Image (cartoon, rainbow, N blue to C red):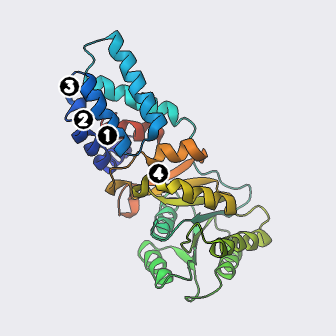
Amino acid sequence: MFGLFKKFKDGFAKTFTAIGEKTRGLFGGRKIDAASLGELEEALYNADFGVATTEEILHEIKLAHQKDATLAGQQAAAIGSAVLQRVLAGSERAIKPAAQAPTVIVLLGVNGSGKTTTTAKLAWKLKQEGKTVVVAACDTFRAAAVEQLKTWAQRLDLEIVASHTGADSAAVAFDALQAAKSRGRDYLIVDTAGRLHNKSNLMEELAKIKRVLAKVDPTAPHESWLVVDGSLGSNSIEQAKAFHKTFGLTGLVITKLDGTSRGGAIVGIWRELKLPIYFVGLGEQKEDLQPYSVENYARAVFGLET
């Protein structure tokens, strides 16, 4: 448990540093006053926690300060963490295997969100848990995307179904699911091409993949996750809405959180869409894709120990 929390804390170091610098040591023992509350408000907005969550955190801290004028920074941090955990209640979700294998997980998102690397890391993680996995290279439009997933597959010893650049992505998905079924594999993870969420013709190609998978297994895909670049902050909400309308999302994977000071975006996405979060990307290594934990997240962004 401690090792996993440390990954969260390290991953959210930039978010915490940004808050800590803005508040000039508010969480380091300094007493709360009007000026420090103003600094905290600015820091939370800049970290993309949004109006509603920021106001809730400030309100709770003000109430506590009215009851105890000696309220110090670490106490304020604990209050902020508790509010976040309350706001995010229900956002944590673990994979539930399908009634009949393979469980099909489709990863969607815009270009640059990290779908291909997430596909490989997720497959490796499941493999480490003793599961058998096939990955499908259905990003047949982006130059070198198929080769990128092949390289990951070779490095991590993963089974892959792929075709050439420009091939019909839905046909690759169809072949991959048939292969996973015939080989008796536990999971199929489908890496799709990046899509601009406001381009209807491109989004329709994703809908075709969904229809084709259902021809092989009427219950597939079992999971449709949007891979979101966490550094985009609240801008990712509109992306999620568009993909949800076209594909029917069942959850989120939020990547690149180790490189941003805007880690509060998780809160805005959850409040707006109520889509559960399965994994978060906290680094570039294969083991840095970690199951999302409300408690670990809420404590890490406020710099608390566990």
Residue that badge 1 annotates: 43
Q: How far apart are marks 2 and 4 (CA)?
A: 22 Å
Residue that badge 3 annotates: 29
User: Pointer 4 and pointer 3: residues touching (CB < 8 Å)?
Assistant: no
Residue that badge 4 annotates: 234
Quick check: 165 above or below 137? Answer: below
Quick check: 295 above or below 219? Answer: above
Helix, strand or loop at disc 4? helix
Q: What residue type is labelled 3?
A: Gly
Residue 287 at x, y percent in the picture: 39, 59
Q: How far apart are marks 3 and 2 (CA)?
A: 12 Å
Q: Mark 1 or mark 4, which is nearer the start of the sequence?
A: 1
Q: Distance between the residues labelled 4 and 3?
A: 31 Å
Q: What residue type is labelled 4?
A: Ser
Q: Distance between the residues labelled 1 and 3?
A: 17 Å
Total marks shown come to 4
Viewer-nearest of discs 1 and 3: 1
Q: Mark 2 or mark 1, which is nearer the start of the sequence?
A: 2
Q: What residue type is labelled 1?
A: Ala
Residue 178 at x, y percent in the picture: 71, 76
Q: Is residue 57 left or right of residue 216?
A: left
Q: Distance between the residues labelled 4 and 1?
A: 15 Å
Viewer-nearest of discs 3 and 2: 2
Quick check: 19 above or below 217? Answer: above
Q: How far apart are marks 1 and 2 (CA)?
A: 7 Å
Q: Mark 4 or mark 2, which is nearer the start of the sequence?
A: 2
Q: Which residue is drawn at 43% across and 30% down?
A: 55
Instruction: Work out which quarter of the rendered image holds the N terminus and state it.
Output: top left
Instruction: Work out which quarter of the rendered image holds the C terminus and state it.
Output: top left
- Viewer-proximal residue among 154 and 144: 144
Residue 157 at x, y percent in the picture: 47, 74
**Residue neighbourhood size for the residue with mark 2, other residues' Cα within 10 Å, grouped as few (<14), some (14–19), many (≥20):** many
